Amino acid sequence: MAVHLLLFSHAHSPPLSPTPALKLDLRRVTNPPKHIRDACDGRSKRLREHLLHQDVFVNLLGTAEADIRAEMEKRIASASDNPTMEISLTVGCYCERGRHRSVAFVEELGRKPWPKEWVVETVHRDVEVQMDKHRSQNYKHHRKRKEETFLEQDFD
């Protein structure tokens, strides 16, 4: 029996599609200070350590882990008569922009000691989108500067 746990971090809007079986709202967790948010996203150890000092964040992690285990046990029990069946559970963790709190939460959930037979995957929808936008803007800026330099050299 294949057991797959998919942990998604994302912004509150637009919602995750298809809708995850478990949804966790991280907006009640206080955001890290601006200087930390500006320097790193939720994959950063520094940002995760900051959040791990908040009781709300730690309590949500414990609750989420218990809920995930209970849901998986229920799904595994219902599929026990079919050993070739694939079981999957998608968990959506969201905050306002999907770059800090939800990402850190998914990273921490992914590090939990899940059963060895579970395949655990973490996906950060909006971090990757933000990184792609940032790379695209940097590329456009770099290309524009190259063109300006080329034109300046032409007329010298």
Image: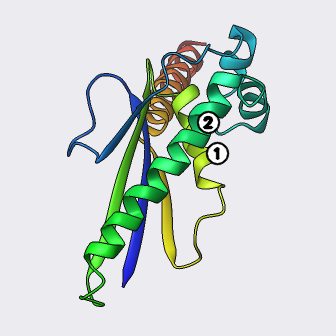
| Residue 134 position within the rendered picture, expressed as x and y whole percent measured from the top left | 50, 27
Q: Looking at the rendering, in which quadrant would you find the N terminus?
A: bottom left
Residue highlighted by disc 1: 108
Measured along the vertical axis of the image, is residue 145 above or below residue 110?
above
Choose top left, top right, bottom left or bottom right for residue 149.
top right
Asked whether disc 2 touches disc 1, contact meaning CB atoms under 8 Å apart, the reply is yes
Q: Secondary structure under badge 1?
A: helix
Q: Which residue is depicted at the point 26% across and 26% down? A: 14
Q: Residue at x 40, y 63 (%)?
A: 72
Task: Pick the residue in front: 56 or 132.
Answer: 56
Q: Residues within 10 Å of mark 1 (few under 14, many from 20)?
A: some
Q: Quadrant of residue 35?
A: top right
Q: Nearer the viewer, residue 100 or 84?
A: 84
Q: Quadrant of residue 106?
A: top right
Q: Secondary structure at mark 2?
A: helix
Query: Vertical placement of 153 versus 9: above or below?
Result: above
**Count of labels in the image:** 2
Q: Position of residue 36 (x, y in %)?
A: 74, 18
Along the viewing direction, whichever of 76 and 37 lies nearer the viewer: 76
The answer to whether any part of residue 86 appears in the image is yes
Q: Residues within 10 Å of mark 2 (few under 14, many from 20)?
A: many
Q: Residue furthest left?
A: 18
Instruction: Provide the residue designation for mark 2.
Output: 104
Task: In the rendered structure, find residue 146 and report the number of the disc placed on it.
Answer: none
Q: Give the residue drawn at x 45%, y 20%.
A: 97
| Residue 41 in view of the camera | no
User: Which three-letter amino acid code belongs to the residue tagged 1?
Assistant: Glu
Q: Position of residue 80 (x, y in %)?
A: 30, 83
In the image, 73 versus 10, the foreground residue is 73
| Amino acid type, label 2 | Ala
**Cα separation between marks 2 and 1:** 6 Å
